[in-house]
Amino acid sequence: MDAPTDPTLHALRRGDLAGARELRLGGPLAEFPPEIFGLAETLERLDLTGCGLTALPDEMGRLTKLRVLFCSGNRFDRLPPSLGDCRALSQIGFRATGLREVPAEALPPSLRWLTLTDNRIAHLPDALGARPQLQKLMLSGNRLRALPNSLEGAARLELLRLSANGFEALPSWLPALPRLAWISWAGNPVEGVSEPADVPRVPWTALALGARLGEGASGWIHRALWRTPASEEPEPVAVKLFKGRMTSDGLPEREMAACLAAGRHPNLTGALGQVEGHPEGGQGLLMPLIPERWRVLAGPPSLESCSRDVCAPDFAVSLDQVLRLATSVARAAAHLHGRGVLHGDLYGHNTLWDGETGEAVLSDFGAACLLPRDRAGEVWQRIETRAWGILLGEMLDRCTAEPSADSSALTDLREWEQACLQPNPRGRPSMAEVVNSLSTLLSPDRHASG
C-alpha cells in the first residue's frame, strides 16, 4: 500500500481520528479507504470530492450515522447501489462524475437533498418519488427528457433545477406541487428563445477594471470605471465576468440572456450593457454599482437548513424595514413576470439591501428562465409567489415590532404571507397584486392615520 500523501488520510490510518463526526479526504485515492469504517459509530459527514474514485464498497450501510456524502468530481458511471443501505443518509452530491445510471436501490430512505448536476443521466427511477423527505433536487446539465411521474407525490419538494436538459415539455403536475418555490428550466427546448435585448455593446477597452467585489457560482463581479462618449468623467459600474461553465443552476449564457431580457428596474441589478472584445474571449455584463453600505440580506442555505436561508443570530429588522424590503423584492418579481421572466432563485441571499432605509434589489439571474407566453406562465408565476412569501415570513419572524402598537400592519403582512404560502398555487396572488397591496401599506396616508 502506498504511503498516503494526504495528512488527514495519514491520521486516519494511524487511528488519530477516532470519534470523528466529519471527514474530508483530498486524494488521490486508488480505492475507498477501509479505515473509514472504523468511524462507523460517529461519522456523519464524508467528503471525497475529487479523489479519483470509481467505486464505493458494498458495505456502505455500515456507516449507520452517515448523513452527508460528497463524491463530486470523481468518475462514477453508476450511482453506487450501496448508498441505499445508509439509513441516515439524507444528502448526496455526485456532481460532474460522468453518471449515466441511477438505480432505484441507490436512493436511501431518508433522502432529502440530491445533487446530480453535470452528468449524463437520461432516466430517473420511479423510486425517487417514494422518498418522503425529498426537499431539494439538482438535475441541471443532464440528458433528461422527462421526470418520473412518482414525483407528483413529492409533497415536500421545494427546490428543483432542470436547466440544460432535453425537456420539450414540463409535466402538467409539476406546478401543482404544494411546496415548490424555486425552479429553473433554462436551456431546455421547452424554454424557447428570447427576443434580442436592446442594450449597449460595451467595448472592453472602455472599461477600467478595479477590485473584485464578489464571486458566485457563475462568475466574478468587479468594480469598474466605464468611459462613455457622452460623459467627460468615467461612470462607476460593476462588471460580471462569467466563468463559462455549468453551475448548479444552469448555463452562464442563459443567465446572461435572462438578465438582458429582464430590462432595467430600480429593484433589480439588471444589465446596463453587454461586454464585448474581452482579450480572452470571455463574456460579461455591465451592471449598476450598488452603494457600499448595502449588504446581502441573508446567508445561503446550509447543510442543515437545506432549502432555507441562514440569517445571523442577532439579525433583526423593524416593521418599516420589513415593509420596504418586501415591497422592493415584490416590485422586482412583478417586473420580471411582466417581462416574461421567472427569477427562479428569489431568496434573501440573492437580495442586497440598505439596512438604514430597507430599500433592496434582487440580484443573481443564474436560475432565471423564460416563462411560457400562454396562461401556463401565470401558474409558474405563483410558484415564485411562494418564494416571496417564505422570504416575507423569515423577515417577520425577526421583526422587532410590538404587536400591540403595530397590530394592523403586522396582521396585514401575516395575511399576505399565508396567502402566498397556501398549498394550491392557483389560489395564490400574483406579485402584481401583492405590490398593489403593499403600496397601500406604504402610503403616507396610512402612516398619518396610524
Image (tube, grey):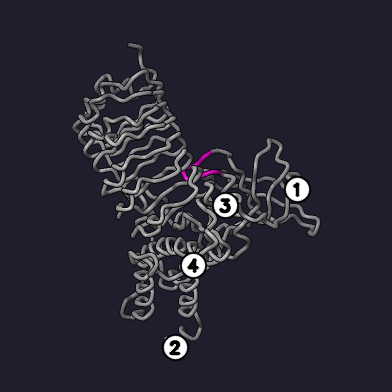
Residue 353 pos. (x, y %): 50, 61
Q: What stretch is highlighted in magenta?
A: 246-251
The N terminus, quarter of image:
top left
State the SS at label 1: helix
> Which residue lies at the image location 31% right of the left edge and 29% below the top edge?
80
Name the magenta segment's main secondary structure: loop
Residue type at the position of mark 2: Ser
Residue identifier under label 1: 206
Q: Nearer the viewer, mark 3 or mark 4?
A: 3
Crowd rating for badge 4 (residues with CA inside 10 Å; few <14, some 14–19, many 20+): many
Residue identifier under label 3: 192
> Which residue lies at the image location 65% right of the left edge and 56% below the top edge?
195
Residue identifier under label 4: 330
79 magenta-colored: no
State the SS at label 2: helix
In 3D space, how far apart are the residues under numbered discs 2 and 3 (Cα atoms)?
A: 49 Å
Q: Which of marks 1 and 3 is in front?
A: 3
In 3D space, how far apart are the residues under numbered discs 1 and 2 (Cα atoms)?
A: 52 Å
Residue type at the position of mark 1: Ala
